[in-house]
Image (cartoon, rainbow, N blue to C red):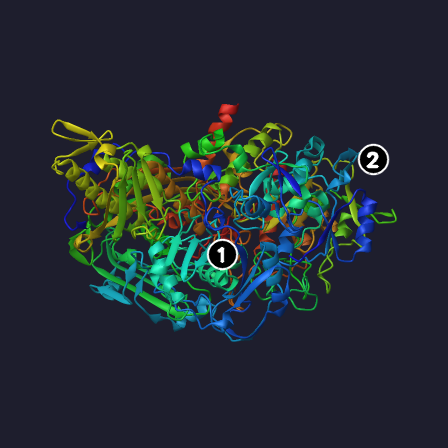
Amino acid sequence: MRFDTPATSNPIDQLKVIGKPTDRIDGPLKTTGTAPYAYERHDVAPNPAYGFVIGAGVAKGRITRIEVSAARAAPGVVAVVTTLESAPLPNGPMNTATLFGGAEIQHYHQAVALVVAETFEQARAAAALVRVDYARQPGRFDLAAEARNAKPVPGDSGEGSGAPPEDRFGDFEGAFAAAPVKLDETYTTPDESHAAMEPHATIAAWEGDRLTVWTSNQMIAWGKRDLAKALSMKPENIRLDSPYVGGGFGGKLFLRSDVVLAALGARAARRPVKVALTRPLIANNTTHRPATIQRVRLGAGRDGRITAIAHESTSGNLKDGKPETAVQQTKLLYAGANRLTALRLAEMDLPEGNAMRAPGEAPGLMALEVAIDEMAERLGLDPVEFRIINDTQVDPEHPERHFSQRQLVECLRRGVERFGWTNRDPRPGQRRAGRWLLGMGVAAGFRNNLLTKSGARVRLDSGGVVTVETDMTDIGTGSYTIIAQTAAEMMGVPIGKVVVKLGDSDFPASAGSGGQWGANNSTAGVFAACVKLREAVAQRLGFNSAEAEFANGQVRSGNRAVPLGEAAGPGGLVAEDAIEYGDLAKRYQQSTFAGHFVEVAVDVFTGETRIQRMLAVCAAGRILNPKSARSQVIGAMTMGVGAALSEALEVDKRHGFFVNHDLAGYEVPVHADIPHQEVLFLDEVDPLSSPMKAKGVGELGLCGVGAAVANAIYNATGIRVRDYPITLDKLIERLPTLA
Amino acid sequence: MSLRINGQARAAEIDTRTTLLDTLREHLKLTGSKKGCDHGQCGACTVMVNGRRVYSCLTLAIMHEGDEITTIEGLGQPENLHPMQAAFVKHDGYQCGYCTPGQICSSVAMLEEIKAGVPSHATSDLTAAPRLTADEIRERMSGNICRCGAYSNIVDAITEVAEKQA
Amino acid sequence: MRPFTYERARTPAEAAAAASRNPGAKFIAGGTNLLDLMKLQIEVPSHLIDVNGLGLDRIEATPEGGLRIGALVRNTDLAADERVRRDYAVLSRALLAGASGQLRNKATTAGNLLQRTRCPYFYDTAQPCNKRQPGSGCSAIGGVTRGLAVIGTSEACIATHPSDMAVAMRALDATVETVKADGTMRQIPIAEFHRLPGDTPHIETALERGDFITAVILPPPAGGRQFYRKVRDRASYAFALVSVAAVVQRDGTGRVALGGVAHKPWRVEAAEAELPRGAKPAMAAILDGAKPTHENAFKVPLAERTLASVLAEARG
């Protein structure tokens, strides 16, 4: 199905199932521990051997020797595979660092060997007997130092954030120089780790030249393509299965070392092999969100109208890596006649930077939305009002291009009312309760909506059961449930009559889970397949498909009504289709918007910041399931708190690695850090996005949260920290002097 | 060796090095208990030993001969959910589901700790019995990390079960 | 984790004897720190002596009016004990500020004292560390040091001791009781139990080969108002950046021990005379001679301000 004109009325608009806060259909499995994750497939891959991955102990250099004889002789060892046995495995288009193969070390904890043994304990012990010698080489590990050598580059996160090396509109320098009120500040964000709870894990099994991997991956079709390339295989000989993914956040978008090592280990061991990256390996072996240095310049008239806006970002990555596209949202979020964005990339030798939840916007808004707060203060304006004054309903660089929907102002106004924003004292450091300084902060949330092809197959059996098959993944997003809701709505059956099968590369390729594009595109693909199935049902019954009504488990036309199972016939019916998009996304800017409101308390003695209240007001098209959508938003808000207050991969700038490479050292928020969170969704349907009229929301919930926290800390303390995370050491010298 | 798991005697041939977690997951195929970090830093492996919650990744199976071990599989099944499991479904107290069994085992044992009068960091008066407040629940559940960030919903789920019990 | 043999000891003396016989042996109680380190081969015992069955899990009144805490009393049970909550609140608070509910259910009194540092370089076996491999060098010095020690450091080591419980015990003047295989008992004042790193950071305590900890003895209650303030980045389940254990009397005198600043719980008794004059002079005396790094220099004002917070609460 081609979607190239705005959606008109369709069966989804009935909203009998769609739009309801349905409990997740996979809930009973997840809460009883019976949903199988990658490392747990005793059902399909019995008697595996255990692989243990060894990571490089240096950040840059060459391996001169790997001594494996002691490991091979150790009890239970079945095979040892080392990186010196093959040339570097070819990378797919999304990867930068070599996953395995060759003597060159590009980053710390790069996989250098796999030890396979009968038991996990034996594999781990034998791995400690492998000796690797290196010829170390000096590396570039300090972004602040390397930023001087950074070169202009274009950026594309692959997730909707893209910008050229430099993009100009109007005369930024002239307008900035002439502006009566100006701001020129630099903000830094650190390297961050996805830190999904489920480690990267794979079981691999060969049958002749056919390979099956049960793995944990967000993008099945990419994974199959890239695994075929890495192993020089035909894609049709590879099957990926990933029905449950224990968190991804971008860390499992691409092929990682667990998959290739499980496959190589299984080939060497001649039996299934299971591999999970150990927690201390994950931060350096896999990818991370790269640190940024961002300069924001704003010029405005005394009326508060922005006349000049510039956002420049520098990040680092390995050779041939990509920049963090932190400036993209600045092209679209606020009005202003004179504009500049720029991206620079420094070549460095830290582990590979790549997509993490809302790449681009997440760190970009952590800078821009603090700058906006600072500018509002300089103008003597309420930060909400300043944002409203500078709202734009068109792409500022292409005024003929309208937003498909843009309710940023409504998000902010609803938030002001709901959060009690008017109780905020605009003068910082005024509100206090006991030892706590209290403050409120606001930020706009912005994230683009991506349209990408997505396919599905739908079966109808003689019992009236509808089965959906698509390689879409559910990484906690609720895909199982919203796909079931979509099929139930389309086919007129209760949700209990729908079976959803996901994550298998033998199913039609879907949009996958990334860039908050999963929900809208994957359900639109199911919509397309259901339209075909409805036609097949109508045709079989001799109904006019345009007139056939699907409701209550029946298909009805005129005064004829046939139970769906009967209509399917004994052999059942099957239909397959994909949603494909025309140029609506070019003609209209499709984005999602939020107002994030945060109240913090800062300990006047110690500078500890604790979040008191959080509210997100979101406008993101039709909300397919308010329960799971709300969860996506609160989860993102939680990640935003981590980014604001505690998360940072600490770089050893001498030896080139992330030092705090486990969950004790890398502090993601815990229960005690997060208060009750409130989420409001504005009524919105977007007929330009898809037949579902929905948009993404899972990353919007993160975009802007960090800045709202930072702005609240400023309101509480009067201390402006422009270097994330805002830990107490950055506040303590400027906290009030004690009596 | 022999272990008592969810009320049943289970035999397993294991290495002295095998953790309780790996015994459950790899030998007994009870994969409901999750391995998130294997170092006591995440809580996904939480089970109950003689009614007390512990990280099964940081204890050896060999040390638990004769102990009564309860895992998520022992609390309820998809067709027969434990009230806490049902409350997690109702309140959407999970997303990816990987930390979920640990959260649920932890919360069931945690409510017993409050009932038994065990204080916490959030207890304001050490000499009084701890109260069942959202802050108490948050502090006591902090040894179970949820990277998806379902905390707010998890607290709602636990609160509902606690109030029904009370 | 290297292969090891395993036995269950039945008496403290038997446990001590087994350890004396076997130079590669380690005691295992809660195991929450030991197994963590064994998985990384930072600890490599060839034999484990399970001491959980020794019955050292009682808290008893002493004839002097104090408490004798069995070595195997779990952190949860110690924190929840009514006598501890009433008379040694600083200890209960410290325990409850540490780790998580699951860890406190397993971790024991003796094991908590013997916790090893959380220095990230100690935990990364690809990096030199004088604790892991004496003489290999300290990779923390000059590296990421935000969480590391500011006082009592040496050129060989700048690690901190991670325990909260031990900091409270230091403020309470606890005594560690040990037994040897021949039945010889020792009473080690907590002040002497943990060592500064000096040139031998791998030697962390005053224990000798074959010493087995049987109990920690608390003197009669110190009275006053008792506080344990732990400052950390996230609100729970994290190690201290700085912690303050304090016993403050009505007249403003008292005792203060610090966590998160040194290789051992840090207390300077002579400095406590400054307490009635306030946090600033007191902490200046307590942290006199501190040599922080650029990254952890904040711990010095943080310690002062945390003490100020405690003193304000004591007055209020």
Name the spot of residue A416 as percent of width and height, x first: 32, 38
Judge by depth and name the residue closer to the eye, A341 or C114.
Answer: C114
Residue A512 lies left or right of residue C206; in this view the side is left
Give the amino acid at mark 1.
Pro
Judge by depth and name the residue closer to the eye, A659 or A121.
Answer: A121
Q: Nearer the viewer, mark 2 or mark 1?
A: 1
Judge by depth and name the residue closer to the eye, A734 or A202.
Answer: A202
Name the spot of residue C41 as percent of width and height, x first: 64, 59
SS at circle 2: loop
How far is disc 2 from disc 1 in space, using C-alphas?
65 Å
Residue B136 visible within the image = no
Residue A178 lies left or right of residue C129; in this view the side is left
User: Residue under mark 2: which chain is it in?
Assistant: C
The vertical placement of A55 against A603, above or below, is below
Residue C153 visible within the image = yes
Name the spot of residue A562 as percent of width and height, x first: 19, 30
User: Residue under mark 1: which chain is it in?
Assistant: A
Judge by depth and name the residue closer to the eye, A615 or A537.
Answer: A537
Give the amino acid at mark 2.
Glu
User: Circle 1 sits on which residue?
Assistant: A272
SS at circle 1: loop
Check residue C64 in the rendering and tell me which mark sits there, or answer none: 2
